[in-house]
Amino acid sequence: MRIIQFREALREALSEEMRLDEKVFLMGEEVAVYNGAYKVSQGMLEEFGSKRIIDTPIAELGFAGIGVGAAMNGLRPVIEFMTFNFSLVAIDQIINAAAKMYQMSGGQFNIPMVFRGPTGSAGQLGAQHSQAFESWYANCPGLKVVVASNPYNAKGLLKTAIRDNDPVIFMESEQMYGDKGEVPEEEYLLPIGKAYIAREGSDVTIVSFGKIMKVALATADELAKENINCEVIDLLTVRPIDYETVINSVKKTNRLVIVEEAWPLASISTEITYMVQKNAFDYLDAPIRRICTQDTPLGYAPPFVQEFLPNIERTVKAIKEVMYR
């Protein structure tokens, strides 16, 4: 099977869906002439033209609103934010228009659109450009929230998101665009709302998503050297969450550690912790542990970045604690 980059997988998904459906178009800052801030849309202007690959001013509220209006009129816009930090300027259109329009119109208007771009930290970008927004948008009914973790699921999930008749928040990472992985040449789709067991195990369940899956899998590799067998679950979607897969795993392993790039309060790990204790309390042999970011804005200096984020060392320690090792 061929090996391609994360950005190439996204580009293939976008291009394939645009060839299949002329109602699909891409709009955002620098997506056309500059080929995309992260080169996701490289070459797409030449193929699809300026009516379907549309450069915008630096005005997220404006072009997000145009996208909502276009979706109400039967088009399928893909709105690219250079970073989801900038989506805060457009959050009124996302939360109060896109997410609510179907319900407020009594089912007269579907909003088949995708908001996509990078979330979370990406090194020394400072506090205003280093925030993770998965749990923010997952809190809002009317939205679906997808967080890809590798090129394979990025392509399959983005194609599904573009075809979905509801608004989808599709979250990526600046630090993953160059990641390489196996992607089939033939068409495939992945379902929204279904988690993936990335590694089977019997001693403890690790749940994560997005780029922090790298920490989860590396932790499992490290602990395997000590004969601790970790089951690793990639959520892929944080609204809706596949609770069943997580709970069934906990019933097998009897222990759970959740690793997430988010502030601890009201995070995805908080929600999963609640649902597991509600539905599988009697199966737990240890308290659930969460590895989140530090509860502070992210500083600029490298030591702050290193201390702020979930890492292998913190995750190994948490797993050994639930294993009473």
Image (cartoon, helix red, strand yellow):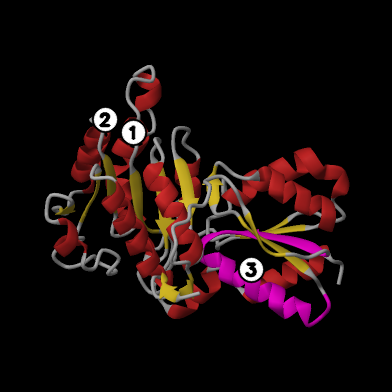
Q: Is residue 60 left or right of residue 123?
A: left
Q: Are marks 2 and 3 in contact (CB under 8 Å)?
A: no
Label located before the other in sequence (2 or 3)? 2
Label number found at residue 111: 1
192 in relation to 132, above or below = above
Q: Quadrant of residue 94?
A: top left
Assign a secondary structure to mark 2: helix
Label 2 vs label 3, nearer the camera? 2
Residue occupying image coordinates x 50% and y 74%:
1
Amino acid type indicated by mark 2: Met
**Mark 1–mark 3 distance (CA, rounded to whole Å):** 35 Å
Q: Residue placed at 71% from the left, 79% from the top?
A: 222
Mark 2 crowd level (few <14, some 14–19, many ≥20, 10 Å Cα): some
Return the residue found at the far top.
Answer: 106
Q: In the image, what residue type sits under mark 1?
A: Ile
Q: Earlier in the sequence, mark 1 or mark 3?
A: 1
Q: Residue at x 75, y 77 (%)?
A: 223
Q: Position of residue 102 (x, y in %)?
A: 37, 25
Which of the two residues, 3 or 280, is positioned nearer the viewer here?
3
Range of magenta residues = 203-227
The answer to which of 324 and 215 lies nearer the viewer is 215
Task: Find out whether the residues at labels 1 and 2 contact each other: C-beta distance under 8 Å.
Answer: yes
The residue type indicated by label 3 comes to Ala
Residue ID for mark 2: 72
- Assign a secondary structure to mark 3: helix
Report the predominant secondary structure element of the magenta stretch. helix
Residue under label 3, please give it: 216
Check disc 1 and report its element: helix, strand or loop: loop
* Quadrant in the rendering for residue 218: bottom right
